[in-house]
Each structure stands twice: as structure tokens, then as C-alpha cells.
Amino acid sequence: MVPPMTIPAAATFSGTDLACLRGGRVVFAGLGFSLESGGALVLLGPNGSGKSSLLRVMAGLLRPAHGVLAWDGEPVGENPEGHNARTHYLGHHDAVKPVLTVAENLRFWAHLHDSHAGRAGLAVETALDRFGLSHLAAIPGKMLSAGQKRRTNLARLLAAPSPLWLLDEPTTALDKASIKALEAVLAEHRAQGGMVVLSTHADIDLPGATEMHLDEFAVAEEFP
Ligand SMILES: Nc1ncnc2c1ncn2[C@@H]1O[C@H](COP(=O)(O)OP(=O)(O)OP(=O)(O)O)[C@@H](O)[C@H]1O
């Protein structure tokens, strides 16, 4: 089972009239979304259309050039620590430390999230099990294949539970069984009231998810 997390009964994560500027170019503008507890948003669009940029904006790693991002009506810019604490952002690069074993990597994340050794230990065991990593627990990060590294990175979602998951192309390098495992974990997370935003170029089963096509928010001219 996905470890339980603390989430308000009915949270809302929203963005209003968002615009993003990168390298002097407007990547998208006039973009809005609203995600309720248990909701999922799938970001689609061709290379360079702004999926990763939007995820970074949502994570608070990139300041929007325009618009407001809010959690339960409170602009996230007014409470960056709170937003950081409720958010799991998994980008393109796997944040697996090469000299630590798979289990040590997960313990590192679990203890950052929860200093209670028993709870953190249980969360790590669950994370290893759900992503088929138990037999690799003692292997150093530098010896993992691309897919094993990606699974270790995804296992952080369970080692350190949080309500909002922002996942940039999470199925990259995963085999079919691992994609199924991820789909099951995403479904359980949502059933507990968690939220998921992910970008993808592949098929992923996320029942009831809203699709957003980033190319619809592209603008031809420079942002004033
Ligand atoms: N660090 C950066 N500095 C300047 N421009 C950037 C930077 N990263 C991305 N961009 C630009 O922002 C635009 C959107 O890129 P982004 O990575 O968000 O697209 P994407 O939809 O995620 O693409 P892909 O499907 O290839 O992952 C692109 O035009 C890209 O060149």
C-alpha cells in the first residue's frame, strides 16, 4: 500500500493566467488549470512546447513571468517552504547518489521527510517493494541500469510521501511491468487524495485525468 500522508480533506492546486519566459522567449502564456484532491493532469505537446517548464513553475523552481499559482487560494510564492514540503518534483535527471546503495538513497529521502526511524524504515521497505527494488537494495546507485535508476528515483515518492506529485516524463526507461507498477502507485496516491501532474510522450493509464496540450498556449510574439 502507498504510505499514508497528511493532506487537507479538499485541497485545490490552481494556476491562473500563467506565462513563462525562458531565454528571452515566451514559452507559454494565458495558461490556467485547477486540480482537486485525487485529480490528475497530463501535460502533452511536442518537444520544446513547455511541459518541463510548466512543471518547474508548478514546483516553485521557476518564477512565472505572469499569473498566480495557488494552493487552497494562497499564492505559493507567499509560502515557498510550505509548497516545497507538500511537493515532490521528479525531473529528467535522476537524483540517485552514485556511492549510496538503493536502500541508502531511499533512507536519505525518507529521513529528510520524517525523522521517526520506524515510520521512515517502513516507508523505505514499501518503496523498495512497490518498485521491484528489494533485490537491488544493497547495490550502489552507480551500478544501476537506466530503468533501475529511474525506478529508484520514483520510489522516493513512497519513501517520503507528499500530496502533490510533479513528474517529468516518469515512464522514460521503464519496462512494461514497471509502468504498470507506477500506474498502480499513482492510482493509490490519488485514492488517498493526492494529486498528480505529469508530462509524457508515452501512453500511461491515469483514469479520469485532464489532458493539457501545451502547444495551445504557445505565443508567436515576445512577451511585453
Ligand atoms: N535552461 C533554459 N534556458 C533557456 N531556455 C530554455 C531552458 N530550458 C528550456 N528552454 C526552452 O524553453 C522551451 C520549452 O522547453 P521545455 O523543456 O519546457 O519543453 P518540453 O515540452 O518539456 O520539451 P521535451 O518534450 O523536449 O521535454 C524550449 O524552447 C527550450 O528551448
Image: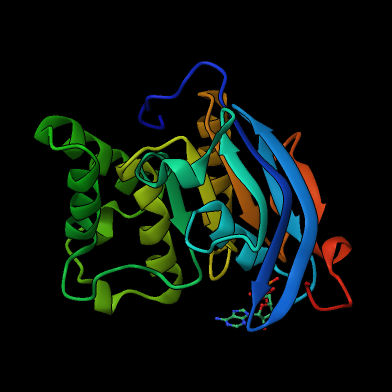
**Residue at x 26%, y 57% (from the top left corner):** 135
Question: How many marks are shown on the rendered structure?
Answer: 0
* Quadrant of the snapshot with the C terminus: bottom right
* Quadrant of the snapshot with the N terminus: top left
**Is any part of residue 205 visible from this angle?**
no
Q: Position of residue 75 (x, y in %)?
A: 54, 39
Relative to 170, residue 181 above or below:
above
Relative to 13, residue 22 above or below:
below
Q: Position of residue 103 (x, y in %)?
A: 20, 55
**Residue at x 52%, y 31% (from the top left corner):** 194
Q: Position of residue 212 (x, y in %)?
A: 79, 52
**Residue at x 40%, y 47% (from the top left corner):** 80
Q: Position of residue 100 (x, y in %)?
A: 16, 68
Relative to 123, residue 99 above or below:
below
* Rendering quarter of residue 129: top left
Q: Is residue 44 left or right of residue 179?
A: right
Q: Quadrant of ligand 1?
A: bottom right
